Amino acid sequence: MKKLLLLCLLGFTLSSHAQLADKKFNIYGRYSFGAYDTTSYNNFGLTGEWLVHRKVGLLYNFDLTYRSDKYRHLHVPMGLIGGPILFVAGLANIFDGDTTSSGGLSLVGIAMLVLPDGVSFHQPIGYRWDVSPYANVLGLDFIKDQLYGYRWLKYSCSFGVRGTYVLNDQITFSPYVETRKTAGVPLGFGAGIGVGILFGERETKMEEPPVQ
């Protein structure tokens, strides 16, 4: 009997659908804290998530990290830097009379502007609840040493798991844990929470469970 109840509970959990899947976009502000080895940090971020599928989202992250050793990180998607460079290079070829690759470079530049730096995978675990592991692998960090004024541009990535609760069909609350890695910086571990808003209705919605 206990095994049967356990199977029924598992079946209900896997068949329930969070309302997050009924929307196409989720924009949320984030705050997290953690440490790189012996250095602590506070991170403030803004994430745009494009839910291209009920179980798959594309992530666009913008972060400002304050480290206790007086370093600052500004994180942006890689495409935001590479896209304009290729687009301008294509225009420069036009003005130089070289039209062989100008159109291709410009198109690639435009395409890179919408290139995400991460992807998320969603699993509903109950009505209004969702768990999503994510990987951000196409990011760049602008780093500044506040003491001496040195600046660097470094590759960065992060991996984590986020839970999401949907309130009133539109407001999201998202606690998460993650690891962060920037080239030349020790591996970081942190935790935080995000608060956001859902919009963009899907044509078909999951049915709500009956009210008991």
Image (spheres, rainbow, N blue to C red):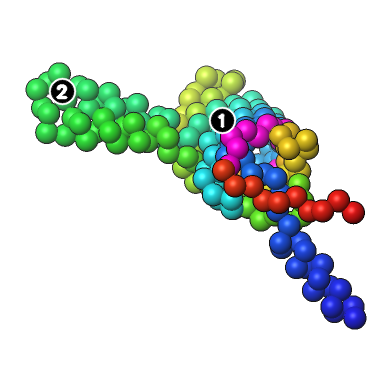
Reading the image, the residue beneath label 1 is 62
Label 2: few (<14), some (14–19) or many (≥20) C-alpha neighbours in 10 Å? some
Measured as percent of width and height from the top left, residue 211 is found at 86, 51
The quarter of the picture where residue 4 lies is bottom right
Does the image show residue 52?
yes
The residue lying toward the viewer, choosing from 163 and 79, is 163
Indicate whether residue 161 is drawn in magenta. no
Question: Does the magenta stretch mainly form a helix, a strand or a loop?
Answer: strand
143 left or right of 212? left
161 left or right of 99? right
In the image, residue 202 sits, relative to residue 210, either above or below, namely: above
Nearest to the eye among marks 1 and 2: give it.
Answer: 2
The residue lying toward the viewer, choosing from 94 and 1, is 1
Measured as percent of width and height from the top left, residue 152 is found at 46, 29
The residue lying toward the viewer, choosing from 135 and 142, is 135
Q: Residue at x 65, y 42 (%)?
A: 36
Quadrant for the N terminus in the image: bottom right
Label 1: few (<14), some (14–19) or many (≥20) C-alpha neighbours in 10 Å? many
In the image, residue 125 sits, relative to residue 202, either above or below, namely: below
Q: Residue at x 56, y 30 (%)?
A: 62
Magenta-tinted stretch? 189-202
Measured as percent of width and height from the top left, residue 151 is found at 48, 25
The quarter of the picture where residue 181 lies is top right
The residue lying toward the viewer, choosing from 87 and 7, is 7
The amino acid at mark 1 is: Phe
- Which secondary structure lies at badge 2? helix
The amino acid at mark 2 is: Ile
Reading the image, the residue beneath label 2 is 94
Does the image show residue 82?
no
- Which secondary structure lies at badge 1? strand
